Image (cartoon, rainbow, N blue to C red):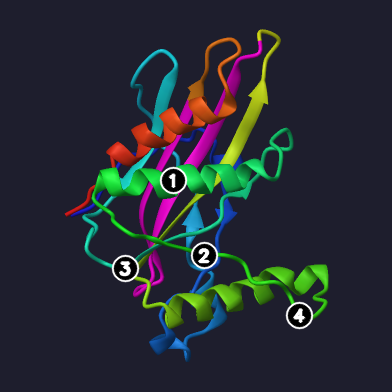
Amino acid sequence: MNNKHNTERFLSNSACLFCFWGAHRQKSCSFAVLCSWLFGLLLSGCQSPDMIITSLYQQNLSGNARWAVMPFQNHATEMPEDFALQLKRILRVQLPANGIADAAVYRQPTATITVPGSARDVYNLERTRLWAGNNDVRYAITGNVHEWQFDEQNRLSISLVLSVLDVDSGKEAWSIDGMAQGNPDESAYDVSRKLIVDLLAAMPID
C-alpha cells in the first residue's frame, strides 16, 4: 500500500532524473523506460525547529534483498564535490541500523574512452545498468543534494533527497526529502549525519 502526501515546495527545481535500468533480464525494453526514475518528489512536514522532513513516498521494502548505495548527485554549487563521497559513506554506515546489512557500494568505473558531454549521461547509465544486473541488485539507494551552505554565523544548512529504486520494476519505491540547519561552528559531517539518520528512520523496511 502506498502512502503519498504532495506539496509544491521545491517542485520547480527538484526534477533530478536518475536514469537507471537495473535488471539484466529486461534488456529489450526501450530507453524511455530506462529513464523512468524521477528523484525529488518533495512533500511537507516538520520534526523539530532545526530539522524538517519535507517529503515521503513509501512502500514496504525488503531488508533481506540485495541493496546497493549509489553516488550522491550534487546540485548545490557551494558544496565541495568530494563531500558527496562523504555523504555516501554516511549513508552506507547507517543502513545496518535500519535493517539493511551489507549493502554493496557502486563505484563508477574509470572511463576507457572519451565520451562527448551530450552522451556522457547515457554512457554512465549503461555502465550502471550492467553493474546492477551483474550484481543481482534489487534496491538502489541514492541522494540528491539541493542546498549546502554556511551562513554568516557559520551554521550549515543542507537539503537533500533520499530515493530508493526498485531495480526489478525500474520504478522509484521510496523517497524522502529533508532540511537541517546546524549550530554555529557545528561540522558539516555532524549536521549531515543527523539528517540522514532521521530520514532513514522513516524508511519502511520489512
Q: Gap in Å between the C-alphas at discs 3 and 4?
A: 28 Å
* Magenta-drawn stretch contains 77: no
Q: Which residue is mark 3?
A: 66
Residue 179 drawn at (x, y percent): 48, 28
| Pick the front one: 145 or 194 | 194
Quadrant holding the N terminus:
bottom left
The disc at residue 106 is 2
Q: Amino acid at mark 2?
A: Tyr
| Pick the front one: 20 or 150 | 150
Given the current orientation, which residue lies at the most extreme bottom position?
28
Q: Main secondary structure of the magenta part?
A: strand
Identify the mark nearer the N-term, 2 or 4. 2
Magenta span covers which residues?
Answer: 154-179
Residue 84 drawn at (x, y percent): 61, 45
* Magenta-drawn stretch contains 178: yes
Tell me: 80 left or right of 23.
Answer: right
Q: Secondary structure at mark 4?
A: loop
